[in-house]
Image: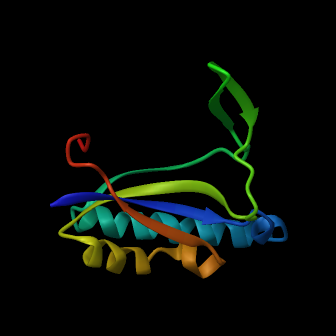
Amino acid sequence: MAQYMLLLYDDPANWAGISPEEMQKAIEKYVAWRHKLQAQGIFAGSHKLAGDMGRVLRKRDGKPRVTDGPYSETKEVLGGYFILTAAGYDEAVEHARGCPHLDYGGTIEVREVDALTAT
């Protein structure tokens, strides 16, 4: 069985007008989905990223340069991730279909974790 990372992207503007009660309901949906993965024995980890844009390092003229970002043409930003165990992409995608992130206009990218680095 391989590990798969579900990268959760969304437009922060989608969350701007949500009430505290709606936010609590959304959080409860994510927690319930995580508990379902845990009960199935396939949950390997997850984290929500902080709301800032982070930093990007690139080497230019032989020196590392640090910029705020990442900034791209899209409004979607990486907001968090889940890692789960699955027999293949089809199974990982099937599990991702149940993620409440899709209910809130988000995008989920499914990527296999390199077997040499998976723990």
Name the residue at the left extreme.
Answer: 1
Across the whole image, how many numbered discs are drawn on residues?
0
Of the pair 7 and 103, the residue shown nearer to us:
7
The reply, left or right, for residue 55 in relation to residue 40 is right
Residue 32: image quadrant is: bottom left
Q: Position of residue 24 (x, y in %)?
A: 65, 66
Residue depicted at x 15% and y 61%:
1
Residue depicted at x 51% and y 67%:
30
Name the residue at the right extreme.
Answer: 17
Residue depicted at x 36% and y 64%:
35
Q: Position of residue 86 (x, y in %)?
A: 22, 66
Q: How is the image coloured?
A: rainbow
Name the residue at the front extreme.
Answer: 61
Give the answer, above or below, for where 107 lies relative to 69: below
Residue depicted at x 38% and y 61%:
111
Residue 54: image quadrant is: top right
The reply, left or right, for residue 20 in relation to residue 63 is right
Of the pair 61 and 50, the residue shown nearer to us:
61
Of the pair 71 and 86, the residue shown nearer to us:
71
Give the answer, above or below, for where 115 lies relative to 39: above
Q: Position of residue 94 (x, y in %)?
A: 33, 80
What is the quadrant of the C terminus in the image?
top left
